[in-house]
């Protein structure tokens, strides 16, 4: 038993590194009380090591800790995406006025960020209903606290309370769904066992539908899919910008990893023959992808329509991130490798452009003290480089060539057309057009409007520019030279236990 | 063993919990309703576990209990932070951000 | 099979009836002359100072939060204690790691001063 655990531990290095880093960060924080600035460095080193271990895992395909967690290229891909986001967020935090104004709590900030990353790593790899609940909770509990990090600001603690109430409600719903599924499948917790039980036995379709809807409620909350999105705008507006950016990319990535793995492994029908290569079928009389299709349409339509009316840029980006979750759900609907690959490609692209946009919101807020779209009037003259970068991120978010965002959408729509989901592709295209309106509105404010109030140029330091350049260059380069991400995505498709 | 009564009781308490979360306005009572939801999950898990003669269900219950405790602790801490800002725990008064 | 329990039911029923009868008899026979003193809250002979319906200090919350967290760990220690022999060294190492992590948490709480009342 001991050597079995040790063998599992060898495949569990990224998570172990994060767990050790979390404990170390807390200890360093209380031992060197006078110098809390050390702790972010510890966190940065820990997460970097974890990402390095995750990169080593891209080739392996194993199940560890008696089926609780799997290590496969699919999980490794998401771990790299999440870890990279965490590193960038820690770099952003150096220039965040919200984080730096409460320097005494830097210990909690950094260590909770590590804990949240650990939770997301586990979410990407969990292959068991129990592990699924625990990892969602670990992510959730750290993010509830981080959302209320600037606790002196009433809107931050309010965001935190709303977040935990919705979070606890959706975990409750998901747990109830899990208990029903547990009974239905005769005590199966592992995804592959659920699949065997469902494929072999005669399970009541109604009970299965109820259980899956309840589980979708929990997962939909993590990826902020409509109608489980109510927390998103409030939390994104109230939380510190760095945390908002982290939630909008990493939390969504972890949620998608879990959703794809749970539904694909649990409900795949491996007896269906005669499908085109790269396609699979869901179990008969349970077409979960139709439910996801409805969610996808609701999510992108509501996200885009409400974003049009927003005046706070953080809130606008919140609704835009809801809409992006809707686009990515389209890739899950089609039940094909191409669809999943498109989702993975979209995540790489989304990481760059969304983090970039939030970073600029953070920089501007630190200088002007406002997140309103009106305060961006005339920014093109006050700070040309930042404004041009913002335009690049925004046209990428809208999906216009020659940016990376276009490539993301291109592969999604190609997968949809390939699987003959024409109506969904049309809905997605209409939504992209709507989204153009509100992105252009901000761009118009920056370049075609005169500045209100101060007209002096806004200066930024060199490292601040450097971080921006790290995000801008790939956004442009991947728009033209995209084969590396496509190859990475195609190599990351295989999941443990599936052909 | 007849499992129906247990599942029925679990379903009823779960619904009471959900209604409590959605309808009550006091943040503490909302958290108590969430506890009720999680405990109804525990009841149905224990019932299934006894019915199937499989202890994994009971193991799951231990973890659900821990999760519930952790959630309650973080929830209480957030309520304290909010109370210090606003002197209220009524959800209707917590409305700087529109719902 | 149920017949064997009849004496127990008789005793329980007798107990309930006896209890109710005694309370009601007391209410019916005993003299009642209430004064302010008699109606006030019983505080083990001390004079009650204030009303009981007031807000408690928020410090109690902190203690409650910490109590929940460190209390729930027992849920994992019990099954381990029951299956201690079967789990052997692997179980021992696992639980040691678990408890060390909890101790780090306790150390943190202590150094942050959350255990002090003032």
Image: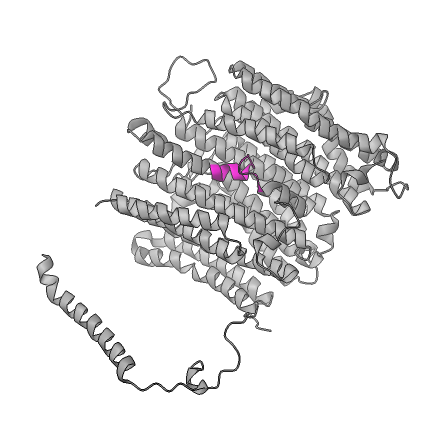
Left or right position of A357 against B83:
right
Quadrant hosting residue A496: top left
Question: Where is A480 relative to A261, above or below?
Answer: above
Residue at 74% x, 31% y is A472
Q: Is residue A176 magenta?
A: no
Instruction: Locate residue C27, reporting x and y percent.
Output: 29, 80
Res. A390 image quadrant:
top right
Q: Which residues are magenta?
A: A217-230
| Of residues A138 and A213, the one drawn nearer to the viewer in this rendering | A213
Locate residue A304, reporting x and y percent. 64, 30
Q: Is residue A229 visible?
A: yes
Q: Residue furthest right?
A: A456
Expressed as whole percent of the image width and height from the top left, the position of residue A80 reads: 59, 35
* Closer to us: C53 or A483: C53
Whether A221 is among the magenta residues is yes
Nearer the observer, B63 or A397: A397
Left or right position of A458 against B58: right
Rendered view: A369 above or below A77: below
Residue C72 is situated, as x and y percent measured from the top left of the image, at 43, 59
| Number of numbered discs visible in the structure rendering | 0
Q: Nearer the viewer, residue A167 or A106?
A: A167
**Quadrant location of the C terminus of chain A in the rendered image:** top left
Relative to A297, residue A149 above or below? below
């Amino acid at each position: 038993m001991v050597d079995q655990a040790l063998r599992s531990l060898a495949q569990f290095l990224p998570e172990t590194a994060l767990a050790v880093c979390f404990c170390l960060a807390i200890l360093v924080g209380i031992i060197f009380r006078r110098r809390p600035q050390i702790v972010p460095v510890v966190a940065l080193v820990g997460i970097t090591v974890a990402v390095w271990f995750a990169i080593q895992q891209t080739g392996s395909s194993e199940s560890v800790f008696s089926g609780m967690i799997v290590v496969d290229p699919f999980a490794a891909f998401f771990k790299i995406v999440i870890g990279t986001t965490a590193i960038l967020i820690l770099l952003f935090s150096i220039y965040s006025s919200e984080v730096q104004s409460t320097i005494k709590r830097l210990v909690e900030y950094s260590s909770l960020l590590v804990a949240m990353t650990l939770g997301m790593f586990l979410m990407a790899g969990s292959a068991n209903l129990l592990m699924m609940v625990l990892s969602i909770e670990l992510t959730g509990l750290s993010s509830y606290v981080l959302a209320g990090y600037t606790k002196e600001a009433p809107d931050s603690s309010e965001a935190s309370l709303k977040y935990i109430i919705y979070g606890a409600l959706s975990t409750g719903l998901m747990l109830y769904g899990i208990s029903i599924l547990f009974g239905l499948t005769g005590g199966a917790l592992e995804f592959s066992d659920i699949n065997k039980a469902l494929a072999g036995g005669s399970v009541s379709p109604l009970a299965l539908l109820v259980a899956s809807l309840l589980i979708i409620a929990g997962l939909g909350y993590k990826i902020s899919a409509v109608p489980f999105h109510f927390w998103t705008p409030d939390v994104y507006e109230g939380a510190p910008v760095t945390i908002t950016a982290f939630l909008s990319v990493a939390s969504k990535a972890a949620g998608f990893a879990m959703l794809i793995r749970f539904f694909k492994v649990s409900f795949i029908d491996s007896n269906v023959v005669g499908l085109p290569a790269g396609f699979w079928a869901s179990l008969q009389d349970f077409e979960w992808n139709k439910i996801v299709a409805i969610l996808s349409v609701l999510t992108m339509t509501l996200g885009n329509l409400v974003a049009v009316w927003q005046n706070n840029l953080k809130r606008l980006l919140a609704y835009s991130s809801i809409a992006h979750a809707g686009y990515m759900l389209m890739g899950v609907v089609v039940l094909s490798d191409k669809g999943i690959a498109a989702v993975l490609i979209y995540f790489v692209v989304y990481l760059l452009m969304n983090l970039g946009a939030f970073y600029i919101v953070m920089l501007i807020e630190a200088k002007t003290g406002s997140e309103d779209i009106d305060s961006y009037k005339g920014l093109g003259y006050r700070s040309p480089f930042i404004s041009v970068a913002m335009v690049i991120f925004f046209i990428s978010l809208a999906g216009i060539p020659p940016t990376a965002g276009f490539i993301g959408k291109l592969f999604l729509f190609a997968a949809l057309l390939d699987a003959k989901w024409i109506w969904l592709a049309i809905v997605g295209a209409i939504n992209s057009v709507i989204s153009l309106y509100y992105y252009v509105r901000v761009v118009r404010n920056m370049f075609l409007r005169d500045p209100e109030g101060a007209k002096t140029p806004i200066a930024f330091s060199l490292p601040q520019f450097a971080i921006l350049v790290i995000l801008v260059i790939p956004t442009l380069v991947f728009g033209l030279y995209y084969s590396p991400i496509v190859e990475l995505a195609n190599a990351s498709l295989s999941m443990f236990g599936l052909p | 063993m007849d499992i129906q009564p247990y599942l029925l009781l679990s379903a009823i308490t779960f619904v009471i919990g959900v209604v409590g979360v959605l309808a009550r306005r006091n943040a503490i009572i909302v958290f108590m309703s969430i506890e009720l939801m999680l405990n109804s999950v525990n009841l149905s898990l224990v019932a299934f576990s006894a019915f199937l003669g499989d202890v994994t269900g009971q193991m799951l219950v231990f973890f659900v209990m821990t999760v519930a405790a952790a959630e309650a602790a973080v929830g209480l801490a957030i309520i304290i932070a909010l109370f210090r800002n606003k002197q209220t725990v009524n959800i209707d008064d917590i409305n700087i951000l529109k719902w | 099979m149920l017949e064997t329990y009849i004496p127990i039911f008789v005793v329980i029923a007798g107990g309930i009836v006896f209890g109710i009868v005694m309370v009601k008899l007391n209410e019916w026979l005993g003299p009642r002359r209430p004064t302010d003193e008699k109606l006030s809250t019983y505080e083990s002979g001390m004079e009650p100072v204030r009303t009981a319906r007031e807000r408690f200090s928020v410090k109690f919350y902190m203690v409650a939060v910490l109590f929940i967290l460190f209390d729930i760990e027992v849920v994992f220690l019990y099954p381990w204690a029951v299956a201690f022999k079967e789990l052997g060294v692997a179980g021992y190492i696992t639980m040691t790691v678990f408890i060390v992590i909890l101790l780090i948490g306790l150390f943190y709480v202590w150094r942050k001063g959350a255990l002090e009342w003032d």
